[in-house]
């Protein structure tokens, strides 16, 4: 895949990715959303005092995990001083700490921490991604930005289709964003549309060939949720274990 230095049309570029490595490389060159490009770069210039010595990634952050994952975790967007700093989803912030610790307890991560791109973390059978690949101001992407970014998620699901059996949406934004993508990627979304909630679950039958996929809802691993106890480690573990079992793992 010959990649341009700057991708500005995900709709044209995403379908060209032949594998997840190519897709991830293309995502990291994306400049399609001017507001998010400005923000991710400004955060990288200004920096948080505690990370002043760090060389921020300050680009789009691709998904992370094996190309034959059977479980896909869909968050919201990279954190300004987490993924936008380290260049890897759920890495270098409290959200990543909580999520990776839970995955490690279930045997799905090689280590309990996620601190940098070169920390040696390996995921087993599970992949992280997000419907928006750039850190947004206030963690709030616009619907237009979500839609501009959608072709990346569409292609990711298409490439994972042979193996993926379960998706966990971390938060309502991820749930709303992934439903139309699943619908367009060969699974039948029940009507009325399933509603997000912690512990919600919906079985999506294949539209043609293939196998069913189960969508799980889980509160996001944001600091706001984990600090307040809205999402406890036990609650997170329970959803991830159920999703992993549904994906054929547990
Ligand atoms: S949010 Fe998505 S579409 Fe927008 S610049 Fe980032 S990677 Fe590209």
Image (cartoon, helix red, strand yellow):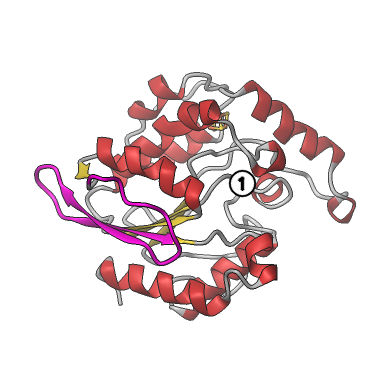
Local SS, label 1: loop
Q: Position of residue 1 (x, y in %)?
A: 39, 28
Which is more toward the observer, 50 or 33?
Answer: 33
Viewer-proximal residue, 235 or 51?
235
The residue depicted at 9 percent of the width and 42 percent of the height is: 208
Outermost residue, left direction?
Answer: 209
Using residue 17 as the reference point, say whether residue 60 is left or right of it: right
- The image shows residue 85 at horizontal and vertical percentages of 71, 47
Which quadrant of the view contains residue 17?
Answer: top left
Give residue 95's quadrant in the image: bottom right
Q: Is residue 195 magenta?
A: yes
Report the side of 209 relative to 229 (left or right): left
Look at the image and give the residue range highlighted in magenta. 191-217
**Residue 79 percent location from the top left of the image:** 66, 48
Q: Quadrant of the C terminus?
A: bottom left
Around disc 1, counting alpha carbons within 10 Å, would you say few (fewer than 14), some (14 to 19), or many (20 or more)? many
x%, y% of residue 181?
Answer: 33, 38
Could you tell me how many numbered marks the image carries?
Answer: 1
Q: Residue at x 39, y 29 (%)?
A: 14
Q: Residue furthest front?
A: 192
Front residue of 195/1: it is 195
* 1 w.r.t. 127: above or below: above
Q: In the image, is 78 to the left or to the right of 41? A: left
Q: Which residue is mark 1?
A: 78
Residue 34 among those drawn in magenta: no
**Residue 167, located in which quarter of the rendered image?**
bottom left
User: Ligand 1: which quarter?
Assistant: top right
Above/below status of 26 relative to 57: above
């Amino acid at each position: 895949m010959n990649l341009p230095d700057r991708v500005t049309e995900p709709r044209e570029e995403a379908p060209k990715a032949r594998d997840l490595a190519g897709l991830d490389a293309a995502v990291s060159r994306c400049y399609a959303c001017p507001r998010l490009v400005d923000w991710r770069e400004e955060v990288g210039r200004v920096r948080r005092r505690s990370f002043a010595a760090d060389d921020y990634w300050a680009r789009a952050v691709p998904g992370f995990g094996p190309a034959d994952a059977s479980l896909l975790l869909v968050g919201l967007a990279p954190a300004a001083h987490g993924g936008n700093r380290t260049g890897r989803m759920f890495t270098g912030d409290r959200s990543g700490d909580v999520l990776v610790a839970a995955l490690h307890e279930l045997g799905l991560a090689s280590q309990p921490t996620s601190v940098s791109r070169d920390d040696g973390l390996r995921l087993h059978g599970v992949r992280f991604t997000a419907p928006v690949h750039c850190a947004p101001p206030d963690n709030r992407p616009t619907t237009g930005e979500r839609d501009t970014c959608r072709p990346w998620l569409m292609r990711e699901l298409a490439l994972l289709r042979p193996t993926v059996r379960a998706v966990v949406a971390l938060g309502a934004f991820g749930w709303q964003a992934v439903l139309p993508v699943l619908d367009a990627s060969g699974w039948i979304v029940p009507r009325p549309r399933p509603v997000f909630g912690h512990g919600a679950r919906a079985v999506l039958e294949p539209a043609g060939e293939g196998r069913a996929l189960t969508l799980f809802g889980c509160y996001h691993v944001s600091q706001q949720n984990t600090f307040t106890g809205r999402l406890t480690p036990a609650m997170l573990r329970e959803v991830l274990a159920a999703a992993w079992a549904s994906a054929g793992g547990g």
